[in-house]
Image (cartoon, rainbow, N blue to C red):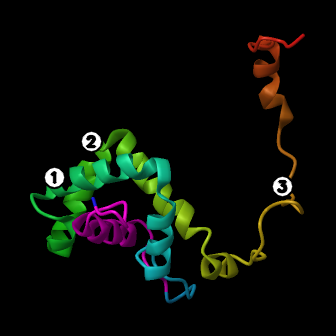
Amino acid sequence: MSDQLPLTPRQRQDLSTIAAMIVPASDEYKVPGADDPEIQADMLATLGRDTKQVAAALDHLARLAGMPLADLEPAARDGVVQQFRISGGVAAATLVRVVLQCYYRDDRVLRSLGLELRAPFPKGHVLPDGDWSLLDPVKARGGSLRRTP
């Protein structure tokens, strides 16, 4: 790995490739894909504790493809991704989460969803009331944490 970036150039190229497959650009909604350079830069800048899992997922994808995923013909990528969904485990789930969280905090995407460009707090977002009785089994279990004096 380089001193500056958390992933190798090959891994970064594969991250962009798989991100575009997870969330492609849409002309209809006027939003970029998750392979957009700004979104990719956000992913790399905020990987933090997820770096090891994302790198493992990208390496697993490359092993399944027999080469870097980005070098594989687009038609063959779908089969590799199907295998990856089955065998990727926690690393695959982490990769997908990272792509989605960075995509859905991009201003262009938020604007397309009609959301105000601001942090969720301190104003918060109003959610409709749900069925609070779903928590009854949890409440019935009682506390499992040690009480402080």
On screen, 64 above or below 145?
Answer: below
On screen, 27 above or below 92?
Answer: below
Disc 3 designates what residue? 127
- Disc 3 marks which amino acid? Leu
Q: Are marks 1 and 2 in contact (CB under 8 Å)?
A: yes
x and y percentages locating residue 122 in the rendered image: 88, 60
Q: Residues within 10 Å of mark 3 (few under 14, many from 20)?
A: few
The CA distance from mark 1 to mark 2 is 10 Å
Disc 1 designates what residue? 64
Q: Earlier in the sequence, mark 3 or mark 2?
A: 2
Q: Earlier in the sequence, mark 1 or mark 3?
A: 1
Q: Residues within 10 Å of mark 2 (few under 14, many from 20)?
A: some
Is 29 within the magenta? no
* Stretch in magenta: 2-26
Q: Which mark is residue 19?
A: none
- Disc 1 marks which amino acid? Leu
Give the quadrant of the C terminus: top right
Q: Residues within 10 Å of mark 1 (few under 14, many from 20)?
A: some
- Disc 2 marks which amino acid? Ser
The CA distance from mark 1 to mark 3 is 42 Å
Tally of numbered tags: 3
SS at mark 2 in the image: helix
- Which residue sits at x=15%, y=72%? 71
x and y percentages locating residue 57 in the rendered image: 30, 50
Disc 2 designates what residue? 87
SS at mark 1 in the image: helix
- Which residue sits at x=77%, y=66%? 119
SS at mark 3 in the image: loop
Q: Earlier in the sequence, mark 1 or mark 2?
A: 1
Query: 109 left or right of 39?
Result: right
The CA distance from mark 3 to mark 2 is 36 Å
Give the quadrant of the N terminus: bottom left
